[in-house]
Image: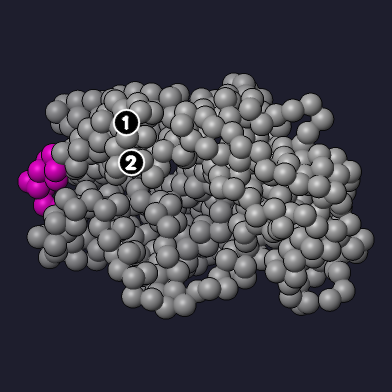
Amino acid sequence: MSQNPSFAPVPPSLIRWLLGVGVFSLLLRTWIALTFPVTGDEAFFYWWGVYPAWGYSDHPPMVGWLIAFMRATLGDSLGSIRLPIVLLPLALGAALWWALHSLDKVRAAWAVLFFWLAPLNWLNTLITTDTPLIFWSALSVAALFRAERRERLDGAAYGLYALSGVFIGCAFLSKYFSVVLGLAYLVYFALYRRERLAGLAVLVGCALPGPAINIAYNMSHGWSNIMFNVYNRNEDAVFAWRKPLTYLGMMVYLVTPVAVWMVLRHRAAVVDAARRHRLLACLVLVPLVFFALLSGKKVIGLHWVLSFYPFGFAFLAFALPADQLKRCARGLAVFAGLHVLVVAALYSTTLETWQTTPVLSKYYPQVVRSYRTAEMLKKVEAPGVVLMGEAYTPASIFGFERREYMPVFGVGKFHARQDDQLVDFSVYQGKTIRIILADPPQLDAYKPYFESVQTLRFEESGVRFYALEGIGFNYQAYREGVLGQIYQRYYNIPQWLPMTGCPFCERYCGQVRCPR
């Protein structure tokens, strides 16, 4: 009589693999988190944690709440706010084990190992909106797996469905890509588990507070999340063959060429596993198809698919023949090792290396800005002068270094429009402003907004940078020339969307909806 896979012990050699990979990858992530300078996105999200709210310009509020919590408990440091992403792979491994060990303990352990061997889990230490999204999505899936393992639709099963709903509601408050996870659930229940639609109804009901919070926020903030995610960022969305091809190449890299090769070689076993593990198959196939269709018009970002990343490796562990699992793990380890070597090589470089090496020199100005931020700011700062940035990335990095919010001067882009909610430019009337620039400014573009303007030149570590100094800021001219353009371009809010507030509109025209 064969042993039930759920009771089979995990081999000691596999446990040693898990301990070794878990510890060494944790040490590497910690080292990178403590030594790598803050990125533009991280510095931008940092201010969400400084100003906790029910939502923000681009996305729902969860990462802001997370950063606020880390600042309050462990202090206002980059290491503190990065700690959640450093620990995230361990938490996701635990979620995978909780979800899958009742199916097959050994394969569940392989699933955790495969996921931990993915290069991203050795190198990613950047806190972003995807960090809480991945965490809550994995917990929702794990709770759903546990609910589906219950033979009867009893109180415990309903409790697990409810827990899954709460978690996906939290995922929705992290990022809208949680909707794709909900779509995967819907496909699974519609095709394979119609007898448990009551469980799905409980799941959906317990998830609703997340969207309700987000809708209330959007109604009172000019539908900023909807305008960004649905309208403003999609104005130039047209089909181009390079977009789906880029998506295909990105997925091969993320899944790893090793895993792709193993799937192709053992495709019969993979198809059979999809029939036996239908929920796992839906969690992999539905997002793959969704983003493949979307890639016809949109460039799919690498981070877009990360909330589904663990389930692909779990499916691989349950699909491959047992005698191929160790071989796959070895291939994944080699692929991860190559990435570690690249990181070690990059960390062995100096500023001079980046300045003098042709293939690296084009990135040298950005490297100087990241590693010599404080030195740059000391050269630009002056008593009574307001500093601003030319775009959200430099403004966020400079502001993070100073621990003082730095506005962006000008129209800006469709993303990262937190200034619209936080900054009242009228308070700068008559003041002297210095706008930090990477290239020499065109003075004529700034003259309408100041009594006088001049170009200031600076140099740090061999990199020339500039500041446009404007004396006597004219708010009324800025309101008509810049804020008016922002309103026309980014606040074309559909009339059918009900609104109870809009911070930008209220400052611009004194009304929730400005007349056009």
The residue that appears at 76% across and 51% down in the rendered structure is 421
For residue 15, side relative to residue 207 (left or right)? left
SS for dot 1: helix
The residue that appears at 23% across and 51% down in the rendered structure is 256
Determine contact: label 2, label 1, CB under 8 Å. Answer: yes
| Residue type indicated by callout 1 | Thr
Residue wearing tag 1: 353
| Residue type indicated by callout 2 | Leu
SS for dot 2: helix
Main SS of residues in magenta: helix
Which residue is more in the foreground, 33 or 395?
395
Where are the magenta residues, as a range? 320-331
The x and y percentages for residue 320 are 15, 53
Residue wearing tag 2: 360
- Please say whether residue 123 is visible from this viewpoint: yes
- Please say whether residue 155 is visible from this viewpoint: no
Q: Disc 2 and disc 1: Cα gap in Å?
A: 8 Å
The x and y percentages for residue 96 are 35, 43
Q: Quadrant of the N terminus?
A: top left
Dot 2, crowdedness within 10 Å: few (<14), some or many (≥20)?
few
N-terminal label among 2 and 1: 1
Which residue is more in the foreground, 58 or 103?
58
Q: Quadrant of the C terminus?
A: bottom right
Is 278 a magenta residue? no
For residue 69, side relative to residue 140 (left or right)? right
The residue that appears at 26% across and 31% down in the rendered structure is 345
